[in-house]
Amino acid sequence: MSAADAALHHLFEANRLLREAGERIASAAGQTHARRMVLQAAADGATVPDIARRLGLHRQGVQRIADELVADGLGRYDENPRHRLSKLFVVTDRGTAALSTISRAHGTWVDAIEAEAADIDWSALRNDLALLVRVLQDQAQRTTPPQ
């Protein structure tokens, strides 16, 4: 196994563990990681298709989550001045409070990681991962058939 292959395998494992941590962190506010991501992506208001594009998810899945968040009072749909049919999903005060709880839990988690992995050069890792993401995006564009 090459060094690149071994590193990519570690990234897959890290991704799995990060997803699990995301679920635990979101549960601090009684949410799931998917619900957290939709709330965060909505920012000050966004359409469901916009949120889906930002997250790289299917619109239908984001619509289901947004509808659940609205039913639970964490979001609402508002009129969209730019599009008559595509409503804006807006985070409510309850949604903002949930995000604040999640943010505090996330900060504590990151602090613990930094303390336990003090030897990691986080800036270099960020730069290396950004380069890897660009390479993977370029590769995906070259191998994706036109639609």
Image (cartoon, rainbow, N blue to C red):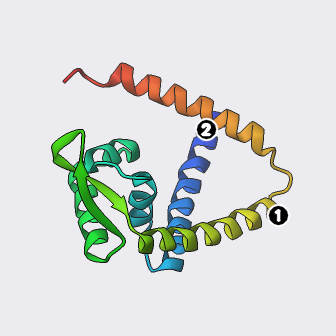
Residue receiving disc 2: 1
Residue at the spot 28% in from the left edge and 70% down from the top edge: 70
Query: Looking at the image, is 16 positioned above or below residue 131?
Result: below
- Quarter-of-image position of residue 143: top left
Residue at the spot 48% in from the left edge and 68% down from the top edge: 96
Query: Looking at the image, is 47 positioned above or below residue 29?
Result: above
Residue 41 % position (x, y):
42, 52
Specify the quadrant that holds the N terminus.
top right
Residue at the spot 62% in from the left edge and 42% down from the top edge: 6
> Closer to the observer: label 1 or label 2?
1
Residue 144 % position (x, y):
30, 25
- Crowding near the residue tagged with mark 2, few <14, some 14–19, many ≥20 C-alpha atoms within 10 Å: few
Q: Nearer the viewer, residue 38 or 142?
A: 38
Check disc 2 and give the amino acid type.
Met
Residue 27 % position (x, y):
49, 77
Q: Is residue 2 visible?
A: no
Say how many tags the image has.
2
- Crowding near the residue tagged with mark 1, few <14, some 14–19, many ≥20 C-alpha atoms within 10 Å: few
Specify the quadrant that holds the C terminus.
top left
Residue 121 % position (x, y):
81, 44
Disc 2 element: loop
Q: Residue furthest front?
A: 81
Disc 1 element: helix
Q: Residue furthest left?
A: 85
Query: Looking at the image, is 89 positioned above or below residue 124?
Result: below
- Earlier sequence position, callout 1 versus callout 2: 2
Residue at the spot 44% in from the left edge and 71% down from the top edge: 93
Check disc 1 and give the amino acid type.
Ala
The span from disc 1 to disc 2 (Cα, nearest Å) is 31 Å
Residue receiving disc 1: 115
Left or right: where 17 falls relative to 107: left
Left or right: where 77 falls relative to 22: left
